[in-house]
Amino acid sequence: MTTPILIIFIGFLIFLGHYLAEMFDRTRIPDVVGLLLVGILIGPVFHLIDPASFGQAGRVFTNIVLVFILFESGLEVRFEQLKSALRGTVTLTTLNFIVTTMLVAAMAQMFAGLDFLSSVILGSILGGTSSAVVTTLARKVDIQEQTSTTLVMESAFSDVYTLAIPISLISLYTGASFSLGSMFGHIFTSLVLAVVAGVASGYLWSILLNKVPTLLKTRFSTPAFVFIVYGLVEQLDFSGPIAVLFFSITLGNVTLLRPRLLYPYLPSRHIELTAVEKDFFSEMVFLLRTFFFVYVGMSIVLNNAYLIVLGAAITLLLFLVRIPVVLASADTKTPLFDMSFMSIMIPKGLGAAVLATLPAQRGLPSGPAIQTITFAVIIFTTVFCTVLFFVLEKRKLLGFYRLFFGSHRPLDAASMPPTEPASAAGGKP
């Protein structure tokens, strides 16, 4: 594809993204499906663009998308929501990762002929959720703030598991140095130090905004600082997405979390985006999301029909086992609609696609099979998730989920008992 054609194509994608977004507002059909389809057509189907030609630029681009989405989402989280959602988030993330890894590993051993360690590597790669998809859909549906916060944090927290464990297991397979203690130690330090780095950076930037008011007049100084935080944390081999998420949460709650020693230095009001800044960030997130999902579609490699069908079967089972995972981790007062929505939020993202290429690069005999199954699960979970989102938002599947979550639950936030505090319900009274 020549440069002029590529530029025309970029302009076409922007118009297409706006059209699909408008269609979503009218029909509630998620735009993600259309963008993925475009990516698949120009990538693996017609081979018009090879994502490998982007090189490291593709990885950088996807990280920028996550930074913008997590930063914008974290600013909307209040400390009360974080405190109430944290325990459920840890339980949901850990339980979902364990159940997913075990299920995928069992299916891979039985039907793909993978050895035990390769099967566990595949399962751990698919044990998380896509921040880009989850955050996008969670903000477009009427659910409790606590539910939305839990899902956004799960997608960020799961990166710790899906990065540390697969890489450690691949090292074990290839005979490199491996220690179970060092693996879990890395997971713990990556999580804790990323949170500490994010909170400390949030306080530091709050002080700078308070002392240098001209920074508030620029539209891109805060995102620029977020990029620095993300890059430094990733360079230290910790979790950049978690650092960004807690940076923005700290920034948005600085008046509630002001240590006495920092009173003179911190602002006395919430750090909030102005209307102009919100419009600017919304447009940036929209543009980045549009290209992100097209890029995901281009990156899909599907070259084995049997393994593709196996990926579809694994996807169906993952949606089913997600139901008891949500039931075990969600609060007993969570409305039925919120529980149902949490049960479909298991899309896999580009992070899993990148990890899936490592086994083949490291010379694992099962590398090509791991890559094909992973790509199949990515596309099927994303498509199924968005389709189920469309159906569920019309309240078409609530009868099915009521069988598992019980008929005693309120339907949604609006139907919560009047004695519930508005802040806890997160919905309209």
Image (cartoon, rainbow, N blue to C red):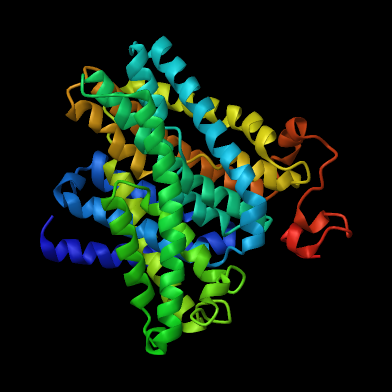
The residue lying at 57 percent from left, 69 percent from top is 253
Q: Name the spot of residue 154 as percent of width and height, x first.
A: 52, 45
Residue 392 visible somewhere in the drawing = yes
User: In the image, is residue 258 above or below residue 38?
Assistant: below
Q: Name the spot of residue 322 as percent of width and height, x first.
A: 59, 32
> Which quadrant of the view contains residue 367?
top left
Left or right of 320 in this view: 192: left
Quarter containing the N terminus:
bottom left
Quarter containing the C terminus:
bottom right
Q: Residue furthest front?
A: 261
Q: Nearer the viewer, residue 387 or 179?
A: 179
Residue 390 visible somewhere in the drawing = no
Left or right of 252 in this view: 174: left
The residue lying at 41 percent from left, 29 percent from top is 124
How many discs mark residues in the rendered view?
A: 0
User: In the image, is residue 122 above or below residue 146?
Assistant: above
Q: Nearer the viewer, residue 12 or 126?
A: 126
Q: Name the spot of residue 299 as percent of width and height, x first.
A: 27, 42
User: In the image, is residue 212 above or below residue 183?
Assistant: below
Q: Nearer the viewer, residue 301 or 218?
A: 218
User: In the image, is residue 270 above or below residue 166?
Assistant: below
Left or right of 315 in this view: 284: left
The residue lying at 29 percent from left, 29 percent from top is 371
